Amino acid sequence: MLLIFFANLFSLRAAEESASAVKLLELRRSREATVYKQEIQAERLERPFIELWDKLRSNNDWLALLSEFRFNEITLPSPLVDQPAKAVSYSYDQWIELLTKLKKAGYELKQSEWRLADYEFSQGSTPKTWMRIKLHLEGPTQERWIVGGDIQIEWKSVMENGRSEFFPDKINGKNLRFQFQKGDPRFAHIIAEHLQSIEPDSSIEPILLLQDLDKDGLSEILLPRENLLLKNLGKGRFNKRILIEGLEHPPATAVCADFDGDGLFDLAYADTTGVTFFKGKPGGYFTIESKTMSAWKQMELANAQAMTAGDIDGDGDLDLFLVQYKVPYQKGQMPFPFQNANDGFPPLLSFKE
C-alpha cells in the first residue's frame, strides 16, 4: 500500500510539472508572437551576416565567401580620397566583377566586423535592417583601407521550399566612410606573447594594464588574469616575470593605483568574493602576503566587468567604482529590448574613509 501511495504521489507531481511546462511553453509562444516578434525577426535577418562573419574569420578566401552572399543591388560611395564621394550602384554580377578585380590587383581583406545596429518593421512595408560594419583591407603597395559605417538592407519576401523567406534585395552603403594610408605601418610588432590564464579552463578575455611601476619613465605591461608582468627594459625589450607569487585564482577585473598614498602603486582585484588589495613594493613587486580585503568582501559581486579609481569626493583619497555585466539568455533572463535592455547587475561605488 505504501508503494502504491508513493507511486500515485509521484504520478500526480509529474502531471502537475508537465502541465506547468505546457503553460510556460504556451506563454513563450504567445510572447514570441507579440512582445518579442520584431526582435526575433531582426535576429533572423541578422543571421546571414553573422554566418558570413564567422566564415570570414576562419577562411582566408574572402572573394569566394563574399560571392556566396547574394543580393540584387548594392549602392556604395566611390572611395575618392580627395574628392566628395559619389554613390554608385552595382548589380550582384557587377559587384562580383569589382571584387574579382580587387583580388587580382593584390588586395586582401584582413579583418571584418558585422553587427546589427537597428531594424524597422512596418505593417505592409518592406522590412529594413541596419548593419554596422568595418572592413580592413591591405593593398599590394603598402596601402591600407578601413571601410566603416552603417549599411541599410531592404529585404524581399520570396518563396523557398514552400515557405516565405526573406532575401536581401537592396543594400545601401552610401554613408560608408573610407580611411586610407600608404607607406610603412604606424605601429611595428615588437612583442608576441602567448597568453594563458592561471585557470586553464578560463575563457575570460585578458586584462591589460599599463603603469610605470618603478618610476623609470617606461610603462610596464600588467596581465592580471595571466598573473604576468612584462618589465619594460626600453627600446622595445621586455622581461617577463610572475606578477604575484602564489596567486591561485585570476581576477574578473583589476586596477593599478596608489591607494594608500605611499608613492608606490598597489593592485586592486575584484571577483565574486569581493575586492582584494595587494600593497605595492619598491621596484614594482606585489606579494600574496600583502593582500587585504575591502568592505565589499561580504557583498557578492555577480559579474564584475571593469573597475577604475579616482578621488570622487575630493578628500585626497582614491575611491573605487566598479561596473558589472549580466550575461543575456542565461537562467531564463531575456533582455528587452535586446539592443538597450538596461537590466544588468548594479555598479558599485566605494568611498575610502
Image (cartoon, rainbow, N blue to C red):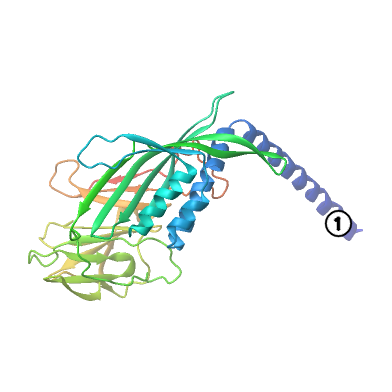
> Where does the image place residue 140, in percent across and percent down from the top left?
28, 60
Residue 301 visible? The answer is no
> Where does the image place residue 323, in percent across and percent down from the top left?
34, 47
Residue 58 visible? The answer is yes
Q: Secondary structure at mark 1?
A: helix
Q: Is residue 302 above or below residue 25?
A: below
Query: Label 1 sits on what residue type?
Result: Ala
User: Camera-side residue: 132 or 232?
Assistant: 132
User: Camera-side residue: 320 or 32?
Assistant: 32
User: 10 Å neighbourhood of mark 1: few (<14), some, or many (≥20)?
Assistant: few
> Where does the image place residue 110, in percent across and percent down from the top left?
35, 58
Residue appearing at x 8%, y 65% in the figure: 215
User: Camera-side residue: 250 or 318?
Assistant: 250
Residue appearing at x 43%, y 49% in the figure: 97
Question: In which quarter of the view is residue 176 placed?
Answer: top left
Number of labels in the image equals: 1
User: Camera-side residue: 247 or 306?
Assistant: 306
Residue position marked by numbered label 1 in the rendering: 7
- Left or right: residue 298 compared with residue 283: right
Quarter the N terminus occupies: bottom right
Of all residues, the one furthest to the right in this rendering is 1
Q: Is residue 249 above or below residue 18?
A: below
> Where does the image place residue 187, in percent across and percent down from the top left?
19, 61
- Left or right: residue 54 compared with residue 253: right
